[in-house]
Amino acid sequence: MREPIAIPLEKENSRPMLIASAFLLALMTAQAAVFVEHGQRGDFAAISLTHGVVYFAAVAAVLRHPGGSRALWIILVAAVLLRMLAMTAPLNLSTDAFRYVWDGRLGWHDISPYLHLPADERLAGLRDVAIYPHINQKEHAVTIYPPAAQLIFMAGVAIGDGIGGMRAVMLICEAVTVIALIGWLRSAGLPPSRVLIYAWHPLPVWEFASQAHVDAAATAFLTLGIWAAVQRRQGLTGALFAFAALVKYFPLVLLAALWRRWDWKLPVVLFAVMAALYVPYLSEMGPGAFGFLGQHLDNEGYRAGWGFHVIWYLRDFNIADPPGWHYAVTALAAMLALAAWAVFSRGRSEFRTERLVLLGAAFVFLTSPHYPWYFGFLCALAVRFPHPALLTMTVASVVLYLNVHNGLTWTHLYAVAYGAPLAVWGAWEAGIRLSPRLRRLNDRWLRPDVLKTRL
């Protein structure tokens, strides 16, 4: 089994390019904050995509000429600056953080967010003009968020009972993610400056720092879990992924690439920690601990079928009209097949980063999220496997903010969010077969034997 291969650093200096890119990104982030403040979603999407173009240039510079500690410091300082600028904007892209604050308040008052609607008159004493009026579906929806997310919300309220406290706890989670990514890179013999792929990506800047989505916490836990896995600590990986999965459920799809086959520690610890987190809520009211999740999926069109981009296109072009559950079963079967492949088509202790990324990207593609923040965890995985199609998927996801206004339909939005990455993947695969130069770049950045390590 081959160990990670350290890629030699080139002597060229990438710092001027990084400084110029950071300056441009700071200007664009400041302008984007103005667009967000005035509710100009179209302009925000346009400038975010432009941010993506400069970001791609910076990623290429770091991959070609990684640099040393000075380059890393430029990257980290610029990442903080971008987040500070983005945080000057109000929560005009999403109202989710208002629900987080409310749930955190209930937690500190020992009130179950799974039992009580925010509009419940018995909770009138907890209302204020800054948070309560902005809570989405407060009249008919209890919380959707699992137990570990509730702990994160309580931590945010402990820091500050408002949006500032929630932003602070998500920034802490982002710092944890960056530390874990640098540790993961160093353990693989790769330059830590590649953390730019996450730190300068527009999606975490806006979704995690500015809009304070709890996906920042899920990403932090799953990144720590991956780092633990490559350090051959299967039990710790199970515990960290239990927390990640009970912030948002999606991290579970990555475990097939991280499990050392037939090692009992990861699954046992995973289920034990998940049970310990869920038991207090289940003892109160049973299956109600899953909150508003089922109704939320209905609202997003998954039961009806149109929420999946594949079904939308089949119906929109009058090709077929399958029910939503048919597609859901097919997608589940596809994910299970990928998981089995990720587990059994490698050595017992072999870890292949590209399979980890494929599981995450396939899950997002098949489930068709309607909001950009669901793509956020892929930005962390891209640090180790920066495939152009993966970067395109995460950058292009901002178009989902446009919804169906100004003549746009889901046909247009799905084409950009999910069609563009497929086109880039096809073009890249064709290019590496036709162009020796592109093949060399692919071998250097994505070569499988460099990505191989042991669990």
Image (tube, rainbow, N blue to C red):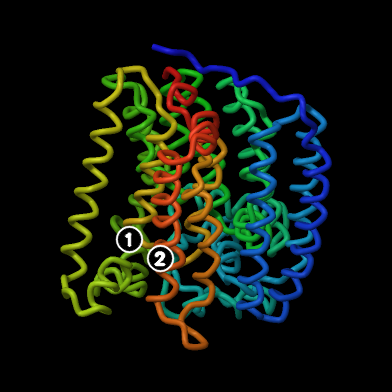
Q: Is residue 199 left or right of residue 243?
A: right
Q: Residues within 10 Å of mark 1 (few under 14, many from 20)?
A: some
Residue 164, horizontal then vertical, whole percent: 73, 60
Q: CA distance from mark 1 to mark 2?
A: 8 Å
Above or below — where is 9 with respect to 172? above
Q: Amino acid at mark 1?
A: Gly
Q: How many marks?
A: 2
Image x and y of residue 341, in percent: 25, 33
Q: Which residue is mark 2?
A: 115
Q: Is residue 6 above or below residue 366?
A: above
Q: Which residue is mark 1?
A: 288
Q: Quadrant of residue 320?
A: bottom left
Q: Is residue 310 left or right of residue 156?
A: left
Mark 1 or mark 2: whose residue is earlier in sequence: 2
Which residue appears at 62% of the width and 26% of the height? 183
Question: Are the residues tagged 1 and 2 within 8 Å (C-beta)?
Answer: yes
